[in-house]
Image (spheres, coloured by chain):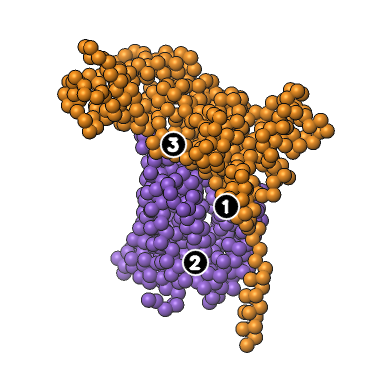
């Protein structure tokens, strides 16, 4: 279809973004929502998701306004070079940190659910080495991979969702709208954080086939993930009810453990979910890792990004092994996100602001001439 | 050429050096089909001998594993708190090479994990809970809230134990239930799992699915769990144990359990027998019932909390009388039978509600669920003291029955 020219099509970038968004946050999201708002979690999810779609659209607008330009170039053009260096390095640190925590949470889940005797270092290392293999090849192979993974996993996951809804107590969703609105508003940031990953649109913007369609990409990807999250949240809530959901570390996995196929030759269907989930984490890690190397390429103004792959690896590995226990991992990840994600999300707003100001000045200039 | 050689070397190495930390051959695993958990009691000195001469060749060496004292009387040390019974199906029995269908191991320990690990000192397989079907908890454990919560957490925390396993509470010892070799299927674990899964199972015991029980307990610490009773050559799952504040407070009989299941809206189809009296005759009429729905209504006008519970059932007459005076195609007779069924059900339900309100003072009827879901405002007021309020609320029962079919004869 496409030759290896480092260009991804409109559909590929949507697939990439969807699979980037779905990572390890999905495992804990239903619990987070129940902790904040009991049975009203879906309201926050819907609100936060729509807000995230808006923010993603802004990202797309920036990409559209600077067709073929990378994140670093856009920053240089709008916010001057020194600030661009600073912000890009900050972005790289954010991605390295996030990747480190992601791979650690991934390894913890795999260790608990699948490989209890395998050392965690080995799980992390095996995953990172596989990721590296793909990252070195660039964005296009990732796009092609997501083209395969996306439809297959959607079909399987939808079937499994259907199965989880077999024996549910639909009244678990009640009471509806009992949480004070202020409390819900305060929790919006947690929901938006769960959609983090769409900021990669800015990094990958330079490689999109038709940048003029970019505004649609973000909202479509986030919207697809929002539907998926809503389904998941309902499935968990209807199955477990708020009290039980609050007690499960990874309710998403546990909900698939409730599937009971009478007469089936496979007893534990959640294995299929775990397999698909490994794919989605793989794409998330890959896309973030690719972001790191592409940004490093821009900052160092080299032609290829693949030299940076191996040097970055130890940093990610170090961060992944930094936290002591699973409790520490989530706490440290939370602190790390709090310090970085707000800034990452406000960079595009800054760019838009400068763009708007420049537009005004341009107009003034033209009129004065 | 050189590249090819390197490739071949790498391929050979990967084949030769495959290392999987988690690989366990299928015959190396001891698949625990059912697990029994009892509170450990120090046997009085006289009984020790008797216990060691028990019928099992395989088990009954528990003292050795835990505390290898010369007298083989375990001390009452904190290590020995639980007594676990593992039932592992004997693969050799399946292929006809052994007479023992089950391998029953019994061990004493402080907690499930360490007991299972200690078990491997005398079992040449790895204890694996991934295919466990049934958990039987002894009465003594269930009566001790602390121990019961420990066990529940151990089961829920384990990544390999499914949430779909069945759970039952045994009056007396769980071990006695698991040591029965039922005539129909001597593999005790499978037999019990089938008992729980039987589609035709009577509503005389609750659902007993671990996930549902855990969900109830997480909410307010109250639940009902089916009761498993050991017989000579069979096991009976009927009646239920009432759990209040993570502690067994009492038993409900079979009829009471059926009433409770109908009230909770979880009853499976089952039968009911009424006695129909006409002018000169008396007929026993069994009716097959499908319990359709159960609905609560809060009487909002009243000052006190008044709950109206409405139930509807559908039925079919299974037996009447040979050449009866009045035949069953007379709607009037059907109406009479319906009224009898309603009356009987209402009576049973009121007795059960009375027992739960006055004797156990625990709301396992699901009224707490109903109020918290449909009347959150009121629930916020009463949630704190629900334990005290529940015994004094008014509950009205209203059953409507429709007998739809009468079988093949008039």
Assign a secondary structure to mark 1: loop
CA gap, disc 1 and disc 2: 70 Å
The circle drawn on residue B3 is none
Residue A120 percent location from the top left of the image: 64, 55
Q: In which quarter of the image is the C terminus of chain A?
A: bottom left
Dot in front, 1 or 2: 1
Residue B299 place in picture, x, y as percent: 31, 18
Q: In this view, does B80 lie to the left or right of B250?
A: right
For chain B, give the colour: orange
Q: In this view, does B313 lie above or below B352?
A: below
Label 2 and label 3: CA atoms lie apart by 46 Å
Asked which secondary structure carries label 3, the reply is: helix
What's the CA distance linking mark 3 and mark 1? 44 Å
Q: In this view, does B271 lie above or below B192?
A: above
Question: Closest to the observer: B98 or A158?
Answer: B98
Tell me the number on the disc at residue A72. 2
- Tell me, for residue A241, which label it has, or none: 3
Between marks 2 and 3 in the image, the one whose residue lies nearer the viewer: 3
> Which label's residue is closer to the chain start, 2 or 3?
2
Question: Which color was chain A given?
Answer: purple
Q: Badge 1 is on which residue?
A: B95
* Residue B384 visible in image: no
Name the residue located 37 percent from the left edge and 19 percent from the top edge: B349
As drawn, is A338 to the left or to the right of A237? Answer: right
Between B192 and B110, the one lying in front of the other is B192
Please state the horizontal and vertical placement of residue B402, each as a whole percent of the image.
24, 27
Q: Check the image and report above or below for B125 versus A206.
A: above
A220 left or right, relative to B218: left
């Amino acid at each position: 279809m496409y030759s290896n020219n480092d260009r991804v099509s409109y559909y590929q970038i949507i697939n990439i973004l969807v699979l980037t968004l779905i990572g390890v946050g999905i495992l804990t999201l239903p619990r987070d929502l129940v902790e904040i708002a009991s049975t009203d979690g879906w309201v926050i999810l819907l609100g936060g998701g729509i807000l995230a779609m808006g923010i993603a659209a802004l990202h797309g607008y920036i990409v559209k306004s600077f067709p073929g330009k990378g994140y670093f170039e856009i920053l240089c053009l709008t916010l001057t070079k020194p600030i661009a260096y600073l912000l890009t390095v900050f972005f790289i640190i954010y991605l390295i940190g996030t990747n480190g925590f992601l791979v650690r949470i991934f390894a913890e889940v795999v260790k608990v659910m699948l490989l209890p005797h395998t050392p965690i270092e080995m799980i992390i290392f095996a995953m990172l080495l596989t990721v590296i293999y793909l990252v070195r090849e660039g964005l296009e192979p990732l796009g092609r991979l997501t083209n395969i993974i996306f439809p297959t996993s959607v079909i399987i996951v939808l079937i499994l969702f259907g199965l989880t809804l077999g024996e549910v107590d639909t009244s678990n969703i009640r009471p509806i709208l009992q949480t004070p609105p202020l409390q819900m508003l305060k929790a919006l940031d947690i929901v938006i954080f769960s959609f983090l990953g769409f900021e990669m649109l800015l990094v990958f913007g330079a490689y999109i086939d038709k940048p003029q369609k970019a505004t649609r990409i973000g909202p479509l990807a986030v919207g697809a993930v929002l539907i998926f999250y809503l389904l998941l949240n309902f499935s968990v809530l209807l199955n477990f009810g708020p009290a039980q959901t609050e007690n499960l570390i990874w309710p998403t996995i546990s909900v698939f453990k409730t599937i009971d196929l009478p007469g089936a030759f496979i007893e534990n269907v959640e294995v299929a979910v775990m397999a698909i989930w490994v794919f989605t984490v793989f794409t998330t890690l890959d896309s973030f890792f690719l972001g790191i190397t592409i940004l490093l390429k821009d900052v160092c103004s080299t032609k290829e990004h693949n030299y940076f792959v191996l040097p970055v690896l130890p940093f990610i590995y170090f961060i992944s092994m930094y936290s002591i226990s699973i409790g520490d991992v989530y706490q440290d990840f939370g602190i790390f996100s709090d310090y970085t994600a707000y800034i990452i999300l406000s960079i595009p707003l800054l760019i838009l602001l400068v763009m708007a100001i420049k537009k005004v000045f341009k107009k003034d200039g033209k009129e004065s001439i | 050429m050189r590249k090819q050689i390197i490739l071949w070397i790498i391929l050979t190495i990967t084949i030769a050096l495959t290392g999987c930390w988690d690989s366990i051959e299928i015959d190396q695993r001891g698949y625990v089909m059912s697990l029994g958990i009892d509170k450990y009691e120090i046997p009085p000195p006289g009984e020790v001998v008797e216990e060691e001469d028990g019928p099992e060749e395989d088990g009954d060496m528990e003292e050795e594993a835990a505390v290898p004292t010369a007298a083989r009387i375990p001390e009452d040390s904190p290590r020995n708190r639980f007594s676990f019974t593992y039932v592992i199906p004997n693969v050799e029995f399946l292929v006809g090479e052994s007479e023992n269908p089950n391998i029953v191991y019994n061990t004493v320990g402080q907690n499930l994990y360490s007991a299972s690990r200690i078990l491997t000192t005398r079992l040449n397989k790895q204890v694996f809970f991934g295919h466990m079907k049934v958990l039987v908890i002894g009465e003594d454990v269930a009566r001790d809230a602390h121990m019961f919560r420990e066990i529940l957490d151990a089961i829920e925390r384990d990544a390999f134990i499914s949430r779909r396993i069945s759970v039952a509470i045994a009056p007396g010892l769980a071990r006695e239930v698991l040591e029965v070799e039922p005539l129909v299927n001597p593999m005790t674990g499978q037999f019990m799992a089938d008992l729980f899964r039987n589609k035709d199972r009577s509503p005389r015991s609750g659902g007993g699915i671990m996930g549902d029980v855990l969900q109830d307990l997480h909410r307010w610490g109250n639940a009902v769990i089916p009761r498993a009773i050991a017989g000579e050559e069979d096991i009976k799952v009927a009646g239920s144990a009432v759990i209040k504040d993570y502690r067994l407070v009492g038993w409900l009989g079979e009829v009471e359990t059926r009433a409770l299941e109908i009230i909770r809206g979880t009853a499976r189809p089952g039968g009911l027998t009424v006695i129909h009296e006409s002018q000169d005759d008396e007929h026993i009429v069994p009716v097959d019932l499908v319990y359709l729905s159960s609905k609560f209504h809060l009487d909002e006008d009243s000052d006190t909390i008044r709950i109206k519970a409405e139930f509807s059932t559908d039925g079919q007459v299974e037996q009447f009388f040979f050449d009866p005076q009045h035949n069953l195609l007379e709607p009037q007779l059907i109406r009479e039978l319906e009224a009898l069924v309603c009356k009987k059900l209402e009576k049973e339900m009121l007795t059960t509600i009375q027992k739960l309100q006055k004797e156990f003072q625990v709301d396992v009827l699901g009224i707490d669920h109903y109020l918290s879901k449909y009347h959150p405002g009121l629930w916020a007021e009463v949630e704190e003291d629900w334990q005290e309020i529940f015994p004094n609320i008014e509950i009205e029962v209203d059953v409507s029955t429709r007998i739809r079919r009468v079988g093949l004869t008039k």
